[in-house]
Image (cartoon, rainbow, N blue to C red):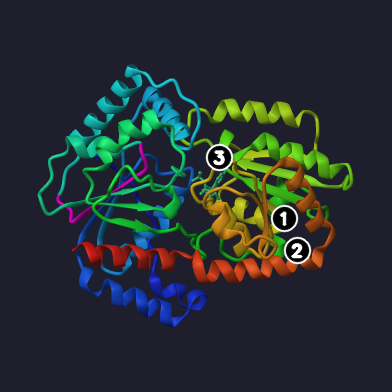
Amino acid sequence: MLKEVKTEMKRLVDYTLVVGEEEICDVRKLAKNLKNIRVLHISSTAYGGGVAEILHSLVPLMRDVGLNVEWRVIEGNEDFFNTTKKFHNALQGGDILFTEEMKRIYLNQNRLNASFFEGKYDFVIIHDPQPAAMLAYLKAPKYTKFIWRCHIDTSVPNSEVWNFLRGFLKKYNAAIFTLKKFVKNEVTFKRLFIIPPSIDPLNDKNRPLTIKEIDKFVRRFGVDPERPLITQVSRFDPWKDPLGVIDMYRLIKRDIPELQLSFIGSMSVDDPEGWIMYEKILRRAGEDNDIYVLSDLRGVGNLEVNAFQRSSNVIIQKSLREGFGLTVSEGLWKGRPVVGGNAGGIAIQIINGKTGFLIESVKEAAEKTKFLLLNKETADKMGDEGEKYVRSNFLITRQLKDYLSLFNSLL
Ligand code: UDP
């Protein structure tokens, strides 16, 4: 049996104040014909990264509206996750030496995980490439519909890896992508859905905090809430360009010497490269005591991330490639302008010049961030616009509606 992930209980009704009665009614209407349908989500990790973040909210809310939902994670050893991280990088356009050994490791583990699959479901949603090939080895009743949910930017994938994977993807009854432009034409999915991710306004990551709480959290790590602060929250991953973040901070620091930078990252079990990147970041940060490199290993959990985002004057997400970038919506939701790389899903969250700035280089990132630090009124206005934009587009109830519509249309 694949290992089940336990989630907290959540109630849709609690979201009424944030999203309004009408939205809640719409969700309930869509759930009406779906009572007790059996849904299984399969992903590679229960913690760390955007997929886990979303499922911790989506799964209990689907249950609350009457669906019978489970979330299970695959098993994998270091070799497997090293391999799938290379796949991930290659699918986002990175270089890879794609070997037979890698294919073997990937397929063997998918076969093994398929052998752990039990139970009867109406829908099985398989998240991302790590478990994508399981379907080829599964025995499931005919009525079970399999959906592949791709969370990454596959607009210019390495062709070798993509060609290898697409044979497995063709077997799915449907696929979900974040953006239309991530869908490669060579795979014709039986059904294709475009669903951008979303954040949960009531979880510890995003719920309101008092100024006192915010100050207490950031002071605990040595940050001075009276001085300007910029923050990037992201896994220690080259695509998030952490070294570029330090370089841009240095450029701004020349003119704003009291500036502080917090870089909050996490170590995910399916991301073995994290430690290498972590060391690189520390080396680049050197002896600068105004750079705070923090992680879950030092007790920076959801509430702390929330406090750092709220304490920041500007949120940075300098990614070079990005499936979506939940951290952008997280920042905007807190009324902070976001300076983000003009990549993938970031570009649908930042309205350039209105909710923040889309940037193409370290220099541009530094210029725009400096502008926001020096022009508080504009920064506040952009933050307000950002909050409104997230409220209408990137909250969990919208994503819940999208999933329920998808189930209705596939039944
Ligand atoms: N995150 C976190 N702590 C960290 C790093 C990341 O809580 O140290 C969270 C972050 O707040 C966000 C998610 O992990 O909710 C990352 O999602 P995103 O879509 O930004 O990137 P991904 O990791 O999926 O590429």
| Residue 28 vertical position relative to residue 399 in the rendered view, above or below | below
Position of the N terminus, as image quadrant, is top left
Q: Earlier in the sequence, mark 2 or mark 1?
A: 1
- Circles 2 and 1, Cβ within 8 Å, touching? The answer is yes
Residue 381: x and y, percent? 73, 69
Label 2 and label 1: CA atoms lie apart by 8 Å
Residue 174: x and y, percent? 26, 52
Residue at image position (48%, 28%) is 272
Residue at image position (18%, 34%) is 115
Mark 3 crowd level (few <14, some 14–19, many ≥20, 10 Å Cα):
many
Q: Is residue 70 magenta?
A: no
The residue labelled by disc 3 is 235
Residue 46: x and y, percent? 40, 44
Q: Residue furthest bottom?
A: 21
- Amino acid type, callout 1: Val
| Residue 26 vertical position relative to residue 283 in the rendered view, above or below | below
Q: Nearer the viewer, residue 9 or 407?
A: 407
Q: Earlier in the sequence, mark 2 or mark 3?
A: 3
Q: Which residues are magenta?
A: 120-129
The answer to whether residue 178 is seen in the rendering is no
The residue labelled by disc 1 is 314
Residue 194 has which mark?
none
Q: Earlier in the sequence, mark 1 or mark 3?
A: 3
Q: Secondary structure at mark 1?
A: strand
Residue at mark 3: C-beta within 8 A of ligand 1? yes
Q: Is residue 269 left or right of residue 193?
A: right
Residue 220: x and y, percent? 71, 47
Residue 379 has which mark?
2
